[in-house]
Image (tube, rainbow, N blue to C red):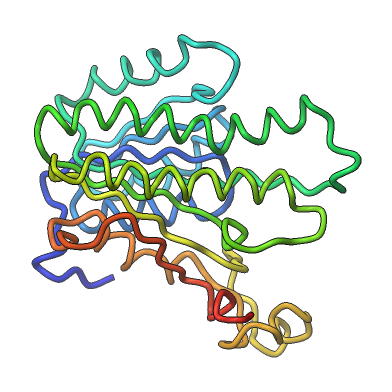
Amino acid sequence: MPVLAEYNLAGRVAILATAGGGEAPFLAQALAEAGASVFAVARNQRLLEPVLDALASYQGTHGGVAVDVGGRHPEALAQAMAAFDRIYSRVDILVNDARSMFAQPATDITGAQWDEVQSRNARATFLLCQEAGRRMIQRQYGRIVNLVSGLAERGMVNGSAFAASQAAVLSLTRSLAIEWGTSNIRVNALGTGNFITEDVPLEVQREELLVRYTPLRRKGHPRDIGPLLVYLCSEACDYSTGQPVYVDGGLNAHP
């Protein structure tokens, strides 16, 4: 991915938190390719390893920790930041990829399931934003990007718990952008649609109804996100904050 000089992240330190999904390794690679050192946070080792493997071939000081920041244990965030502080002296960029999917009819969702979805997606995002924000305010610089699903602004059958968590993250993004704007911190959301991580022929993709409903008539690939993510994490992103920017093939343009 060619990186314009004004989007260069050389010398920057980024935290990438992921709730799982195939996009996280590509996001880490985009940041590292732009020059950032990347520290990954995932709730277990199985989710962390693919991100660390993706970073292995890139220059920079990369690391990570497996800890459930959004879980029941209040010390988890402190553990994650202690692991981070052993390697780095500051955080310039925070990318939250909190899109842990959950589909269930609304009438069947238990209180425990609801709480788990909100913890993984909304609570973990808030706690990491809060901690990184404190540090960014001290240095009067920061870039925060929260990835959200298009369901942050749309509804879907069986998607109430997940959609609510995504709407919470989007609302948090807007509020933090207002609160921290005078501290030279930009907080934006990067919205996604129907994505896959493998290369599937277009004619096969278009057999699916959702693909035919998508204006660009294909599914997204994490490669489609990388350039915009790098921009939102760069100094060039200086007059955009509190904004959701969707990379979804036009899905959100539908009524």
The image quadrant that residue 121 belongs to is: top right
Q: Is residue 168 above or below residue 232?
A: above
Question: Residue at the spot x=23%, y=47% of the render?
Answer: 143
Image coords of residue 37 (percent x, y): 22, 41
Judged left or right of residue 7, residue 195 is: right
Judged left or right of residue 89, residue 179 is: right
User: Considering the image in quadrants, where does the N terminus appear?
Assistant: bottom left
Question: Residue at the spot x=36%, y=64% of the render?
Answer: 226
User: Considering the image in quadrants, where does the C terminus appear?
Assistant: bottom right
Q: Is residue 24 above or below residue 120?
A: below
Please state which of residues 108 and 97 is positioned toward the viewer in this rendering: 108
Please state which of residues 69 and 10 is positioned toward the viewer in this rendering: 69
Image coords of residue 120 (percent x, y): 59, 33
Judged left or right of residue 119, residue 224 is: left
Judged left or right of residue 162, residue 225 is: left
Image coords of residue 210 (percent x, y): 73, 77
Q: Is residue 221 above or below residue 49?
A: below
